[in-house]
Image (cartoon, rainbow, N blue to C red):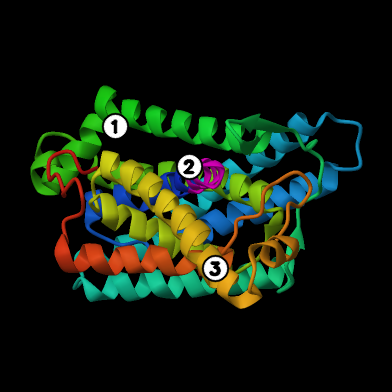
């Protein structure tokens, strides 16, 4: 039971991050039916920019929370500008082109952003400064850190805020109208180009915060970190129902739980066969700095893509389905 609760905590943390990133994919797809494969690189830029600001301010006398806040306040507008640049320069000219053209462009922009990040921050794995104190709480035998609590709380707050924006504001109504029929929305007075640009900007802002949280959670950042994270978030969007806002949230949380539980149990069985005894395995994979190591973490990437394949085979519309009128 202790292992189960620990993996649930880890899964909720990962799932919250996946859900926030998946919202960027599902919002863009709901509006213009484009899978923005460069969205993972926007998350990476958010982590890298935050890392630069935090590293520069780490030696000052500012409180740790003020330093982190400064990092995210710089990363959010920078990523929003990057999101607007992607929409205005790369995707808007291809809006009426065949569906394959913007898809290839999205992949190309992903590669371009990776190379730009490599030139700016090098190809090395960069470590986040350890400015936050390690605070760990025991909950029914499981360990949960203050950072994990903060990540889960912030992610749920952002998801709730986005839901309110989509379903309770004029901009949200314009986004839903554009998603249902852009031409009719334009005839009704909706500035479709502005709505689409706003969708990219909002998604990029969420990606900036997600990038900072991913960097703080793992303590590392790399110019290729957005590739795998983006694919997992896309898998979460497909799992819940691509274009469906609640579906992206549910899909992200479920994918995080599947990864954590699968890696925790199936990975442990594999490790047990490798090391021979439970004690030998535990001696090799032990607690690190108060955080319980996720056993079998080498296997967790497999489960995300197995889930994606199964969903595409047996339920292509996702668990909650693609809701046409509300999908933006």
Q: Are marks 1 and 3 in contact (CB under 8 Å)?
A: no
Region of the chain picked out in magenta, as a range: 1-14
Q: In the displayed image of the protein, which residue is found farthest to the top?
A: 168
Find disc 1 in the rendering and name its residue.
166
294 vs 103: above or below? above
User: Which circle's residue, 1 or 3, is located before the other in the chain?
Assistant: 3
Find disc 3 in the rendering and name its residue.
113
Find disc 2 in the rendering and name its residue.
12
Q: Position of residue 220 (x, y in %)?
A: 70, 58
What residue appears at the point 20 percent right and 54 percent down from the top-left corner?
318
94 vs 80: above or below? below
Is 218 situated left or right of 242 in this image? Answer: right
Is residue 142 visible in this depiction of the protein?
Answer: yes
Q: Position of residue 68 (x, y in %)?
A: 72, 37
Q: Secondary structure at mark 1?
A: helix
Is 296 situated left or right of 138 in this image? Answer: left
Is 322 situated left or right of 163 in this image? Answer: left
**Mark pair 1, 3: CA separation:** 29 Å
173 vs 289: above or below? above
């Amino acid at each position: 039971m202790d292992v189960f609760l620990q993996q649930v905590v880890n899964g909720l943390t990962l799932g919250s991050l996946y859900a926030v990133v998946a919202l960027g994919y599902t919002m863009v797809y709901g509006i213009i039916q484009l899978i923005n494969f460069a969205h993972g690189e926007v998350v990476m830029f958010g982590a890298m920019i935050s890392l630069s600001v935090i590293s520069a301010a780490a030696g000052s006398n500012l409180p740790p929370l003020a330093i982190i806040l400064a990092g995210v306040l710089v990363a959010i507008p920078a990523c929003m500008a990057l999101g607007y640049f992607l929409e205005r320069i790369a995707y808007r000219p291809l809006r009426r082109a065949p569906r394959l053209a913007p898809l290839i462009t999205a992949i190309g922009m992903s590669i371009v952003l990776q190379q730009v990040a490599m030139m700016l921050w090098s190809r090395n794995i960069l470590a986040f400064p350890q400015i936050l104190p390690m605070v760990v709480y025991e909950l029914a035998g499981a360990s949960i850190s203050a950072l994990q609590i903060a990540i889960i709380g912030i992610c749920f707050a952002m998801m709730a805020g986005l839901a309110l924006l989509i379903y309770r504001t004029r901009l949200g109504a314009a986004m839903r109208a554009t998603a249902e029929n852009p031409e009719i929305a334009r005839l009704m007075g909706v500035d479709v180009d502005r709505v689409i640009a706003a969708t990219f900007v909002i998604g990029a802002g969420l990606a900036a915060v997600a990038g900072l949280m991913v960097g703080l959670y793992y303590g590392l950042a790399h110019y290729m970190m957005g590739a795998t994270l983006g694919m997992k978030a896309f898998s979460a969007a497909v799992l819940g129902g691509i274009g469906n806002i609640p579906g992206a949230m549910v899909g992200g949380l479920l994918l995080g739980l599947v990864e954590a539980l699968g890696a925790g149990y199936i990975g442990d069985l594999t490790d047990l066969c490798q090391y021979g005894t439970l004690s030998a395995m535990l001696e090799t994979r032990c607690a690190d700095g108060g955080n319980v190591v996720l056993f079998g973490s080498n296997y967790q990437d497999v489960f995300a893509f197995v889930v994606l394949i199964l969903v595409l085979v047996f339920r292509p519309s996702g668990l909650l389905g693609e809701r046409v009128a509300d999908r933006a």
